[in-house]
Image: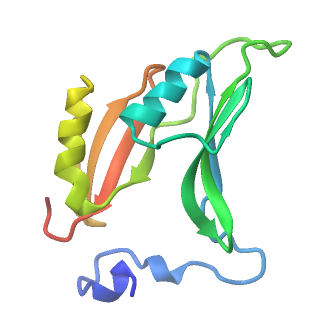
Amino acid sequence: MTDSDTRTDSSLPDFDGRPNGPGAVRALGEFALRVEDLPAMQAFYRDVVGLGDPIGDFDTSTFFGLGESHAGHEAVFVLFDQTDTDGYDGIDSEKTTIDHFAFSIDADDFDAEVERLRSHGVELNFTYHEWVEWRSMYFSDPEGNRVELVCFDADGG
């Protein structure tokens, strides 16, 4: 049963109405960030965000597994260090098109995650998105990217 099967409010989005024909996107497979301090970013996402040990760790990239995405494909979050690449100009946070990205957590873990992140000295901002019944916390990583931890919460947090 999906979340939309349990909802009765017709103002909520219909997540089951996605395209399903040949070639339709089924799920997010990978999200990759360009980073300038790979060891610091790896430690932050492993220990602070809580992604655990990487599934692939190389000289200039680190891959974190996020679970099955679709049809046996592992969803991954990747950090790429391209500082030694010819022509690399650096990261300019004022020119990025990324607003933020989110990792899903269980609603039952939300309060514990707040306390765990605060114990790491992370400054948090909170929002409840009524239109989808999602409870979210936002924070910044060491290179200024905005990260969201989000869960479905029909009770409104």
Classify 153 as above or below 66.
Answer: below
Q: Looking at this view, is 121 or 88 the one in front?
A: 121
**Residue at point 64%, 50% (across, down):** 30
Q: Residue 129: in sight, yes or no?
A: no
Q: Is residue 26 left or right of residue 41?
A: right
**Residue at point 31%, 38% (across, down):** 138
Across and down, in percent, residue 53 comes to 53, 40
Q: Is residue 156 left or right of residue 5?
A: left
Q: Residue furthest right?
A: 86
Quadrant housing the C terminus = bottom left
User: How many tags in the picture?
Assistant: 0
Across and down, in percent, residue 42 comes to 54, 28
**Residue at point 48%, 20% (across, down):** 143
Task: Choose top left, top right, bottom left or bottom right for residue 123.
Answer: top left
Across and down, in percent, residue 68 comes to 59, 65
Q: Residue 40: in sight, yes or no?
A: yes
Colour mapping used in the image: rainbow
Q: Looking at this view, is 115 or 30 the one in front?
A: 115
Q: Is residue 60 left or right of residue 6?
A: right
Quadrant housing the N terminus = bottom left
Q: Looking at this view, is 80 or 115 the one in front?
A: 115
Classify 44 as above or below 11.
Answer: above
Across and down, in percent, residue 74 comes to 64, 60
Q: Is residue 131 left or right of residue 102?
A: left
